[in-house]
Image (cartoon, rainbow, N blue to C red):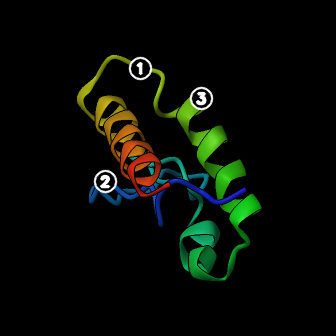
Amino acid sequence: MEPVTKKPCIDICEFNKKEICKACGRTRQEKKQWKQLSPEEKQAIWTRILESHGSGKGKQPRALRELYEKAKQKKSKKA
């Protein structure tokens, strides 16, 4: 399974005490290793962060969902 986008970054990198980005929900380790992760690992991270960080009503969750949907539509047009 190929992930729908290269990365879930919404350009607001701020980490909490648990080393998790408050905007996209990835850990520092995941951000550093993103390019080396398999498509399945990337999709698993996307699934997790959409549930944890993309489920709210605020600006950041909305931006994360919009990024995912936009990439999904772009991928389906290529297929």
Residue 56, labelled with which disc? 1
29 vs 79, nearest the viewer: 79
Crowdedness near tag 1: few (<14), some (14–19) or many (≥20) residues, C-alpha within 10 Å:
few
The location of residue 20, given as percent across then percent down, is 55, 53
Image quarter for residue 59?
top left
78 vs 69, nearest the viewer: 78
Amino acid type of disc 3?
Glu
Q: Residue at x 60, y 57 (%)?
A: 3
58 vs 1, nearest the viewer: 1
Position above or below: 30 against 67: below
CB-based contact (under 8 Å), mark 2 and mark 3: no
Position above or below: 37 against 74: below
The location of residue 25, given as percent across then percent down, is 52, 47
**Quick one: quadrant of the N terminus?**
bottom right
Amino acid type of disc 1?
Gly
Residue 51, labelled with which disc? 3
Distance in Å between CA atoms under marks 2 and 3: 16 Å
Indicate the secondary structure of the residue bearing disc 2.
Answer: loop
Indicate the secondary structure of the residue bearing disc 3.
Answer: helix
Distance in Å between CA atoms under marks 2 and 1: 15 Å
Crowdedness near tag 2: few (<14), some (14–19) or many (≥20) residues, C-alpha within 10 Å:
some
Please name the residue that numbered disc 2 is placed on.
10
CB-based contact (under 8 Å), mark 3 and mark 1: no
- The numbered mark, 2 or 1, whose residue comes first in the sequence reads 2
